Amino acid sequence: MEMSFLSISDMFLFNDRFTYSNKLKDTFKNIGLFCKSSDYAIVKGASIYNDLYVNSNHNLGNRVCPYFIKDSYSLYNRYMEYDGNLLWIDSNNSNIGLRPVIVFDKIPQFLLDRIIINDGYYSLYFGEYPRNVCPINRDIYLNILFNRGNLESTNDGYAFDINGNMDRKYKYNNEMFIKSKINLFDKNFIRLSNGLIYKNNSYVWIKVEPVEWIVDINNNMLISKDVLLSGIKFDNRNKYNMSFENTKMYNFLNSYMINDMIYQSIDYKMRVKTK
């Protein structure tokens, strides 16, 4: 099991836009390649487009977000833009979203048994990750408990940079939450999915939730339905050797993100325990 991104080889040009997948055409033909952002990704600096929504569903939680693919050249990396174009961006830019892909030699049967048939695609839930901001009443109450020292820390969390700095995880009422600092890329305020406007450098409580994956059985891949994180530089070297496996981004995905999302999850631990 390895974590990666989609690549240019997964896509083809259609009407001057990279909007459909080639080898993944059966996976994306009914839903396209546009991707919405979690609140956690926005909090960590993801660039979103307030007037473009996935499937034209005008809900704050459906705003389209650009995301990296794994192809790079020299100082630049490719990413999927809001309108379906594949563009290049400097490797030091960190406001592009992360849409992880889990690659298997063969998708395990216990995951195939979880497949849900949706309108035009197959999906399943696997692992846990910070997703969406809490409603204001829950946010206030968690802050009260936190300030009193009455929240149980789990002593683990979710890394948000290549050095492994993390947002600590807390347990309340058998649910998991993180308290995360808002780190916007180029603005002072942001509206999150609960409809409230938050100021840069303030803190917000985000709920840890199961991760939904689009299932590509033919290629043994799980593709995140949403952008899950941002704020990570693709690399910091002057030139690549054209190998994604040698980038800082690959190291982050497979040293931190896969561990935080999958290996430390209750979902995975229960699977190992019952084997």
Image (spheres, rainbow, N blue to C red):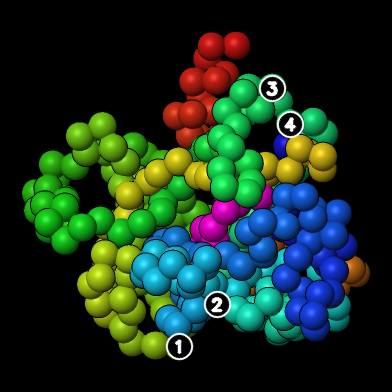
Q: In this view, does 159 lie above or below 35?
A: above
Q: Horizontal and vertical percent for residue 160?
A: 49, 60
Residue 225 inside the magenta-drawn segment: yes
Which residue type does callout 4 highlight? Ile
Q: In which quadrant of the rendered image does the N terminus lie?
A: top right
- Residue 107, numbered circle: 4
Between circles 4 and 2, the one closer to the viewer is 4
- Residue 109, numbered circle: 3
Which residue corresponds to mark 2?
95
Per the model, the C-alpha gap separating discs 4 and 2 is 31 Å
Quarter of the image where one finds residue 57: bottom left
Residue 227 or 268: which is nearer the viewer? 227
> SS at mark 1?
loop
Which residue type does callout 2 highlight? Asn
> SS at mark 2?
loop
Circles 3 and 4, Cβ within 8 Å, touching? The answer is: yes
The tag earlier along the polypeptide, 3 or 1, is 3
Which residue corresponds to mark 1?
186
